[in-house]
């Protein structure tokens, strides 16, 4: 299999691109970050008025804790020890999901196993008998105002993750608003997948070959900044 | 106070804010056939994970068991019954039980495997799924500090499900680091009012 962007570089590129999406909004935001690439997004956000919510009951999550900062009563939803930012606050899990379900959280960034061309997301389970857990993903994709999927374009063995129709169990139907991979940026418009940006390493033909989902190309297609 | 076959609720998220001492005691006394209602089940042999390792569990109702691979193993061997609930629905269902609401509608999980066989209803053109409240016989919660009446304050993300579970059981036992005289907690800072707490256990 041909590697276009090495995995580590791909993850950083995706995280940076998602961070830029929030930095460019001309307003204060509250965002929730899932585990994996989404957690990395926090490291690239430059604005100081973007507040990170953790669904286990914290608004104003700071960087990961190191050394003496580690407190086992202060963790994010991925169980990593974190720090506080000025103005941070704590609340119970029902209030936390009240924020999410009530549409108060501006955006959630999540990873995915598959996303289909209508924006349905599969990210909670591979039915292989070894997993049993759903987390807050179903609440987040149905409740957050904007759902950003941050994932590598293909699986480790080169299979498409952007598919015509998910064959893994669905987390939420038609919920994705934006999909960022190391090769492209898509928006969902009128339940159609629209290509907005393409990585400099590849041609449109190559992207089509690597993507099972059908998409239309935005008239104003841009090259992804890397 | 916890009999075989009881439904028990245990606070905590991962290893933050779970009643370590109460869970240790439950594991040591060996009471079995339990239904455990909790976000997760710790790690293998650690925290609530001990109850599974000891085969004290009949059923689990909760949200995320991938931190403890013994759970999927036991479930797929047919030794325990597991009901997965989306995390926000789980939190709200416990809150609902505590505040006298038998069921509620949410958009989370509509159309998915977790909403199978559940009633749905449309409101303003959008579909919602009906979720039942989750009640327990006994809640084991962890707080940072209590006063002698049972008013509770928490610390950081150790709060999580504890204040909700304190409301949702017939009997609530709170494990705390410290018990202070009545009147010495700032009334504006009390998170769980003492009406919800039956028994205090202090860690030494």
Image (cartoon, rainbow, N blue to C red):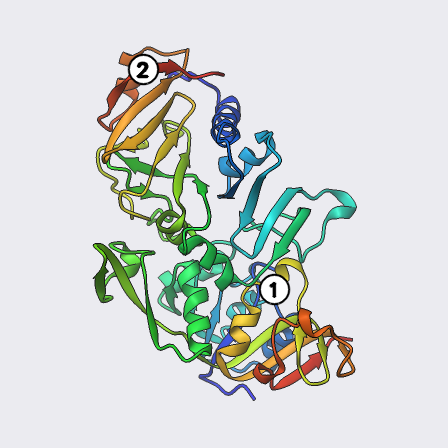
Q: Secondary structure at mark 1?
A: loop
The C terminus of chain B, quarter of image: bottom right
Q: Quadrant of residue B197?
A: bottom right
Image coordinates for residue B193, horizontal then vertical, percent: 61, 78
Q: Quadrant of residue B29?
A: bottom right
In the displayed structure, A225 sits above or below A132; it is above
Circle 2 marks a residue in which chain? A
Q: Quadrant of residue A62?
A: top right
Residue at coordinates 66% horizontally, 54% vertically from top-left? A74
In the displayed structure, A225 sits above or below A186; it is above
* Structural crowding at the residue carrying mark 1, measured as other residues with C-alpha within 10 Å and reported as few (<14), some (14–19) or many (≥20): many
Front residue of this view, candidates B132 and B37: B132
**In the visual, does B77 lie left or right of B163?**
left
In the displayed structure, A180 sits above or below A223; it is below
Residue at coordinates 51% horizontally, 69% vertically from top-left? B52
Q: Secondary structure at mark 2?
A: strand
The residue at which mark 2 appears reads as A220
Task: State whether discs 1 and 2 lie on one chain.
Answer: no
Disc 1 and disc 2 in contact, CB within 8 angstroms: no
**In the visual, does A3 lie left or right of A13?**
left
Q: Which mark is drawn over residue B159?
A: 1
């Amino acid at each position: 299999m041909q590697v276009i962007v090495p995995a580590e570089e791909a993850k950083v590129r995706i995280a940076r691109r998602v961070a830029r999406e929030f930095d460019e909004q001309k307003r204060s935001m509250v965002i929730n970050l899932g585990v994996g690439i989404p957690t990395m997004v926090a490291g690239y956000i430059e604005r100081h008025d973007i507040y990170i919510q953790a669904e286990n009951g914290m608004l104003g999550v700071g960087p990961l804790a190191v050394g003496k900062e580690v407190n086992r009563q202060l963790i994010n939803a991925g169980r990593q020890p974190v720090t506080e930012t000025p103005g941070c606050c704590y609340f119970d899990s029902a209030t936390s999901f009240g924020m999410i379900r009530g549409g108060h959280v501006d955006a959630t960034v999540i990873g995915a196993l598959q996303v289909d061309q209508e924006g349905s997301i599969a990210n909670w389970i591979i039915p292989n008998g070894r997993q049993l857990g759903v987390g807050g993903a179903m609440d987040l994709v149905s409740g957050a105002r904007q759902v950003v999927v941050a994932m590598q374009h293909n699986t480790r063995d080169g299979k498409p993750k952007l598919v015509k129709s998910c064959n893994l169990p669905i987390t939420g139907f038609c919920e994705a608003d934006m999909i960022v991979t190391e090769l492209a940026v898509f928006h969902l418009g009128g339940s159609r997948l629209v290509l907005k940006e393409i990585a400099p390493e590849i041609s449109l033909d190559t992207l089509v070959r690597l993507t099972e989902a059908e998409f239309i190309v935005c008239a104003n297609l841009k090259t992804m900044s890397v | 106070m916890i009999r075989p076959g009881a439904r028990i609720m245990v606070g905590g998220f991962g290893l933050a804010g779970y009643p370590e001492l109460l869970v240790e005691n439950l594991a040591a006394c060996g009471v079995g056939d339990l239904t455990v209602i909790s976000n997760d089940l710790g790690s293998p042999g650690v925290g609530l994970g001990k109850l599974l390792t000891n085969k004290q569990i009949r059923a689990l109702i909760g949200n995320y068991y991938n931190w403890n691979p013994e759970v999927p193993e036991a479930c797929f061997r047919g030794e325990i019954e597991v009901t997965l609930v989306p995390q926000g629905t789980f939190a709200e269902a416990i809150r609902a039980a505590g505040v006298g609401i038998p069921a509620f509608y949410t958009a989370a999980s509509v159309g998915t495997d977790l909403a199978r066989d559940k009633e749905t209803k449309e409101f303003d053109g959008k579909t919602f799924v009906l979720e039942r409240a989750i009640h327990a016989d006994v809640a084991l919660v962890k707080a940072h500090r209590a006063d002698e009446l049972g008013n509770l304050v928490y610390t950081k993300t150790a709060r999580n499900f504890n204040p909700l579970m304190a409301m949702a059981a017939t009997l609530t036992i709170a494990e705390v680091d410290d018990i202070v005289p009545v009147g010495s907690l700032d009334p504006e800072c009390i998170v769980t009012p003492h009406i919800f707490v039956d028994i205090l256990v202090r860690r030494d």
